[in-house]
């Protein structure tokens, strides 16, 4: 609360002057109110939950089981290059024949359309994602988001081979 303090009369006679009054404001109730409001808003606020993508890992094979080979007709290879470029080709890269490398983009009419077309043609399509050493993390997250958006059942992150990097360099795209 505010108080007004008056100074005592000095006892001298003469002219009467206006009394000087000093004010003192007690800030304790205002500080209490500020802490109550702060506590209230802190307790009633909901914090952002981290966005996490669910990834289902394959079951480990039993010892002695032969490894399953991926057919070239069931594969789609996506190469993530530098400068936000994304390439793809049908099948697997082999020594006998070089596939036709195609350039795409990260928008809805780019790689998403390619993934949906492949999924419609062959529901058993396995997408092999091969990021280049010079590609950035954002592009990796973008392609994983596309896998989630297009509801791809099978995809794998694979190290890029020298043959794939040579294919990108020789394509001129």
Image (cartoon, helix red, strand yellow):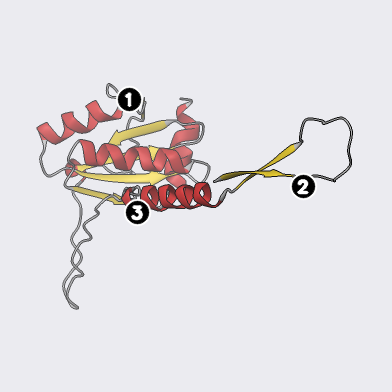
For the residue labelled by badge 2, is the local secondary structure a helix, a strand or a loop? loop
At label 2, counting other C-alpha atoms closer than 10 Å, the crowd grade (few under 14, some 14-19, many 20 or more) is: few
Q: Give the alpha-carbon distance from disc 3 to disc 1, as whole Å.
A: 41 Å
What SS does tag 3 mark? helix
From the image, tell me which residue sits under label 3: 43
Earlier sequence position, callout 2 versus callout 1: 2
- In the rendered structure, the answer to whether residue 93 lies left or right of residue 62 reads right
Residue 8: mark in rendering: 2
Name which of mark 3 and mark 1 comes first in the sequence.
3
Judged by depth in the image, the label closer to the viewer, 2 or 1, is: 2
- For the residue labelled by badge 1, is the local secondary structure a helix, a strand or a loop? loop
User: Residue at point 16% right, 47% down?
Assistant: 153
- State the image coordinates of residue 128 (x, y, percent, origin top left): 29, 46
**How many dots with numbers?**
3
Per the rendering, the mark at residue 130 is none
Is residue 94 visible in the rendered structure shown here? Answer: no
Closer to the camera: disc 3 or disc 1?
3
Report how far apart the C-alphas of labels 2 and 1 lie in the structure.
Answer: 82 Å
Q: CA distance from mark 3 to mark 2?
A: 50 Å
Q: Which residue is mark 1?
A: 107
**Res 60 visible:** yes
Please name the residue shown 20% across and 52% down the image: 70
Q: Residue at x 23, y 41 (%)?
A: 148
Q: Position of residue 122 (x, y in %)?
A: 11, 37
């Amino acid at each position: 609360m505010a108080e007004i303090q008056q100074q005592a009369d000095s006892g001298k006679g003469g002219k009467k002057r206006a009394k000087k009054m000093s004010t003192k404001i007690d800030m304790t109730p205002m500080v209490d109110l500020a802490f109550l409001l702060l506590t209230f808003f802190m307790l009633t606020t909901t914090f952002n939950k981290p966005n996490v993508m669910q990834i289902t890992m394959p079951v480990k094979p039993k010892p002695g089981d032969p490894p399953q080979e991926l057919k070239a007709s069931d594969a789609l290879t996506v190469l993530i290059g530098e400068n936000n470029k994304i390439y793809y080709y049908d099948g697997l890269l082999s020594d006998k024949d070089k596939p036709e490398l195609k350039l795409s983009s990260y928008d809805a009419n780019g790689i998403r359309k390619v993934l949906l077309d492949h999924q419609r043609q062959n529901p058993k399509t396995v997408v092999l994602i091969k990021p280049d050493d010079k590609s950035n993390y954002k592009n990796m997250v973008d392609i994983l988001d596309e896998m989630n958006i297009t509801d791809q059942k099978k995809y794998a992150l694979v190290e890029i081979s020298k043959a794939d990097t040579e294919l990108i360099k020789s394509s001129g795209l």
